[in-house]
Amino acid sequence: MINSNMDKKRFLSGILFLLPILLFVHVSFTLNGMTSQQETQSVSEEKTSLLRLLGLIPSSESLDYVQNKTQFQMHTLLTEQRHLKTWNLRDRIDQDVEAGLQMLFSVDEDLVTRLQSLGEEKDLLEQAVQSIEEAILSGKKIYIFGSGTSGCIAKQIEGALWRPFWIELKQKKKIWSKVRPFVGDSVEEHLIGEMPGGDQSLMNPLDELEDFSIIGDLHLQDHEIGPGDVVFCITESGETPAVIRTILSALDRWKDKNFYDFEQARKKLYFIYNNPDDLLRNFEHSRKVLDEPGISKINLSTGPQAIAGSTGMQAATINGFVLGHIIQTALDRSLRRFLSKKEMAKLGFCGPLTFEEVLEDFAAILRRVKKKIPALAKWTELEADTYRNGHHSIYLAQKALMTVLMDITGRSKIFGVPYLDTVKQQEKKCWTQVWTPKARLEDSWSFLLGRAFHGFPSSLIQNQPSNEINGPHHDKSGITYYIKSGDDVQYLYDFSFAEFNLQNRGPQEGDMGVVVSTGSEALQMKDKKSDLFRFLNLFRDKEFRTSLLLVTDKSEKTISKIIRKIPGFELGGKDVLVTLPIQTQKDPLGLNQFIGLKIILNAHSAGVMARMGKVIGNTAADISLHNLKNIGRATCLVQSHVNDVLHRPQWVKLYGVQKSISYGEANAVLYEALTFMENKRGRVDGETEVALSVIRVLESLRLNKPLSLNEASQILRGKGLHHYLKNITP
């Protein structure tokens, strides 16, 4: 109670003094901590000037997405932002391919910085190494689960690194006789790499399944993962429902024990992600993991990606590098317990591995990669010209098969080009074929995976709650719509260098061939009967262009002696040669070669796609809207490109100051474009929901009258989004 006028004045003065502070705190909290729902709800409650201008009432799907699908609205995350280093990538690539590639590699420098700081956090890495070491020696499983590119990396670690290592070790009978009593006969089966949908997702990444959180639990059941097994769950965003459910379900298996000990659980359960904790805490599902003491968190944030939102580039690279070296270090320490230095050297382990040395390797790899920019630029131009002229490419790979495959399927996922062709397709739709030197379809799958194909068991879906398996997607499709159960799925895809592909997918006039070789595979080219030599002859006999990418531990001198004898690759030849020397000393799994190859392929593909008009600025223009995360990503792209134009001084001079469009407005326009494209026949290349939405909004604001989607489509077909945005202001 206030008893005097003086007290009242003091009270009021205090309130007046505090009001600005309270207002500042409130605004700061709102801006920095708001969820997507808080940011966009008002758009659904009241039509804004843009929606009134368009005469657009947000659809029920848009309202539901904005208000209820906030966990998929990740535009606040660092991995979704546009990187300043590559802001005008498309223009730079068009003018100078070498300069454009230099821009892309400059973003990989962010990883060098993060890895240097990671050396100060090595206690957690050491804990992970010890956990894997214990699993190897006790027969426990090591389970790696990720979606998208992270899922491919999980399968790469299993099929291309882990399994081949043990198979080769078993062939060294004296050494194996010492190792076998400690690890068991089936040690190669103990590491499992998985992704939503299983092996079939390698050929056509089922991004839709990321949204079904139960898919993670179903895969845990399929592989019988339990307490004591080591689990790594990888999500670049930090907010993938299927991945989060996996790590929480793995934890529940610990909590079901009579004597749950969170300190023991967190030594076995690891969550790897690429966004800062303070941003992820705005998401309920991520917050559950971050606040859980029974789960160890490995944060590998490096910032925005070279292509906005394309986390298969830098985020996936650092995840694969760090996790791969954790596993390799654990192998080293396990085997060193009962093998001599000489025996370890025969396996490729030359001295004990330290994290300080390992983390420094990445900077050395990147330096070598950047030295190859001139040769890489020629390859990028050649491949882009091949597609621009309506032709195709065929990639041949052996040990590099998984890396090549995930890069090619990534082009479809990120840039909207057709996915790899099935055997049922009468004519080629995908721009690229991927082959490996195997005689049968089944052999090529076994070579890729290091084991037989494993289809998703349909029995796991039975008796699941309908709300878990019915789709949250705009098309309402349930989980069974996307998963082709059983092992017969493998027969849809044939990537063997054999009769079917030679007859039905062989090179035609104007096509190009690409050989991707790692390790000592380049030596096969000395043999004119080898598969590599035979593949090159398919193109050389018809005077078609070819490219060779060799990631090898052989000297440049040795390689040049071999290559210069192959027509087209002699000094001044018309074909393209890119060699990347990376030693395998202290790297018996060949992990550093895989990372170097991935960095090159990522930049090359981004450069090719930019040259083909699939990049606007540094964003993917043809993003597919197959899952709710991508709908959020597309919404952000519409908002970003529109507001970028509205803030140009030339626009303000011509049309005055206009309010930035909100996330909710962009989403409402995008959903109408989505319905328009679903009902439309004859979609042409580059005609996407994002492009239609951007042009429709900007033209409507420029003319101050509503533009229909049909009118926006006509403009898009005539100019393309890149040309339109570049010339909308003089």
Image (cartoon, grey):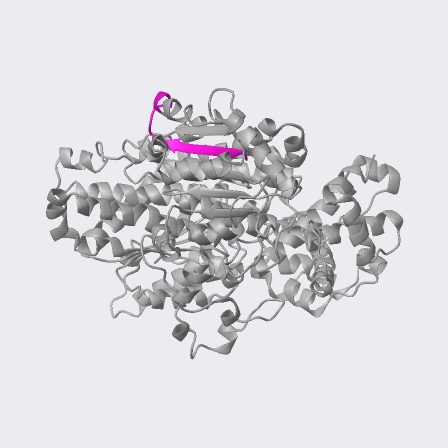
Is residue 679 placed above or below 139 in the rendered structure? below
Query: The N terminus lies in which quarter of the figure?
Result: bottom right
Q: In percent of the image, x 32 and y 64: which residue is there?
A: 223
The answer to whether residue 257 of the structure is visible from this angle is yes
* 374 lies left or right of 8: left
Give residue 684's position: percent from left, percent from top: 71, 53
Position of 257 compared to 111: left or right? left
* Furthest residue toward bottom: 463
From the viewer's side, name the closer residue of 325 and 166: 166
**Percent position (x, y) of residue 28?**
63, 48
Closer to us: 278 or 333: 333
- Choose between 232 and 538: the one closer to the eye: 538
Residue 277 forms part of the magenta stretch = no
Asked whether residue 299 is in view, the answer is no
Identify whether 190 is placed above or below 582. Answer: below
User: Seen from this angle, which residue lies furthest front?
Assistant: 541
Would you identify the image quadrant in which residue 629 lies?
bottom right
Does 545 lie within the magenta span?
Answer: yes
Q: Which residue does the image show at 65% across and 51% down from the upper left?
A: 636
Please indicate whether residue 246 sits to the left or right of residue 715 in the image.
Answer: left
Q: Position of residue 367 (x, y in %)?
A: 44, 26
Can you say which quadrant of the picture contains the C terminus?
Answer: top right
In the image, which residues are magenta? 544-558
Residue 40 image position (x, y, % from top left): 68, 59
Q: 167 or 329: nearer the eye?
A: 167
Q: Does 490 sit left or right of 675 as displayed?
A: left
Q: Residue at x 13, y 45 (%)?
A: 173
Q: Is residue 576 above or below residue 3?
A: above
